[in-house]
Image (spheres, rainbow, N blue to C red):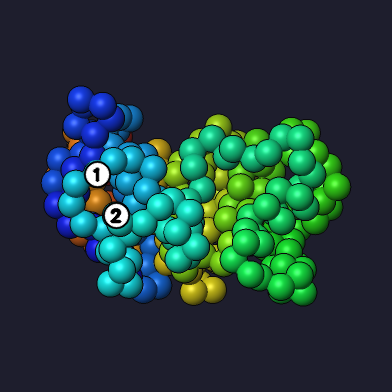
């Protein structure tokens, strides 16, 4: 579905990505792991059209690098950024309705149906549908950010650090929902600081280091890779 070829990205004079190649197939969860500053967020922002790039980004054989961020979203590539970025002065339901991007021509009846799907996935959002977003807990705000993206009917969903700042039990719940979203047919690109958790839920993974892909492969194999274990999982295979 998604193919990134020889991608370079700059922030001003600083080159943040150096010839990145990446693919996401239909039905996959693909994880991006790496240290802070490795370029993971820049890669997602590049795909979303938020960063100036050189190279090719193709989605279903369409060239995304020639599209505006709005057009990219309109083609079904949706991005849940790090830090949630909910609208604090809007209610939960209003935040979700913003995600329906009504300018795409979705009928009111369909928006209502999509709301019910979001509430079925995240029942706590239904309980708090009239609450202002600022009053939600961190975990509830993350649910809202993901639910808002789902209202846009993603064909490819990109999640940037969905576990950041959340309690362990909330993280477990969030990742159960991520797996469920994928099982319902949505491919996912997952950037996650918890490398072990990302590898456990994903089909394949890429390791970014200094703006370049250094390791890639089947996630189960990467969990057993000594280089990955020592750098990102906190232990070597020999250490158990």
Residue at 45% in and 44% down: 160
Mark 1 near mark 2, Cβ–Cβ under 8 Å? yes
Query: Quick check: 88 left or right of 66?
Result: right
Residue at 51% in and 48% down: 80
* Disc with the residue nearer the chain's start (1 vs 2): 1
Query: Quick check: 120 left or right of 105?
Result: right
Say if residue 206 shows up in the picture.
yes
Disc 2 designates what residue? 65
Query: Quick check: 146 left or right of 206?
Result: right
Neighbor class of circle 2 (other Cα within 10 Å; few <14, some 14-19, many 20+) is many
Q: Above or below — where is 203 with respect to 32?
A: below
x, y percentage for residue 63?
A: 28, 63
Secondary structure type for disc 1: strand
Residue 145's tag is: none
x, y percentage for residue 189?
A: 39, 56
Say if residue 236 shows up in the picture.
no
Count the marks: 2
Name the quadrant containing residue 77: bottom left
Q: CA distance from mark 1 to mark 2?
A: 8 Å
Residue at 30% in and 56% down: 66
Neighbor class of circle 1 (other Cα within 10 Å; few <14, some 14-19, many 20+) is many
Q: Residue furthest top?
A: 13
Question: Looking at the image, which is closer to me, 235 or 84?
Answer: 84
x, y percentage for residue 134?
A: 74, 33
Q: Name the quarter where the N terminus is drawn.
A: bottom left
Disc 1 designates what residue? 53
Residue at 59% in and 52% down: 146
């Amino acid at each position: 579905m998604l193919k990134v070829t020889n991608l370079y990205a700059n922030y001003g004079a600083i080159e943040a990505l150096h010839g990145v190649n990446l693919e996401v197939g239909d039905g996959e969860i693909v994880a991006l792991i790496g240290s802070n500053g490795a370029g993971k967020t820049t890669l997602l922002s590049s795909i979303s059209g938020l960063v100036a790039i050189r190279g090719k980004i193709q989605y279903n054989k369409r060239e995304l690098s020639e599209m505006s961020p709005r057009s990219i979203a309109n083609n079904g590539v949706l991005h849940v950024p790090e830090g949630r970025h909910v609208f604090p002065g809007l209610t939960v339901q209003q935040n979700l309705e913003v995600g329906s991007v009504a300018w795409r021509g979705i009928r009111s009846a369909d928006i209502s149906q999509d709301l019910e799907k979001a509430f079925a996935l995240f029942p706590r959002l239904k309980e708090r549908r009239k609450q202002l977003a600022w009053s939600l807990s961190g975990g509830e705000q993350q649910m809202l950010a993901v639910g808002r993206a789902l209202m846009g009917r993603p064909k490819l969903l990109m999640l940037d650090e969905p576990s950041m700042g959340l309690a362990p039990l909330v993280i477990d719940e969030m990742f159960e929902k991520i797996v469920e979203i994928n099982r319902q047919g949505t491919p996912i690109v997952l950037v996650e600081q918890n490398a072990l958790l990302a590898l456990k839920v994903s089909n394949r993974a890429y390791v970014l280091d200094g703006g370049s892909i250094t390791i890639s492969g089947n996630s189960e194999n990467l969990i057993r890779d000594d280089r990955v274990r020592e750098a990102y999982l906190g232990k070597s295979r020999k250490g158990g």
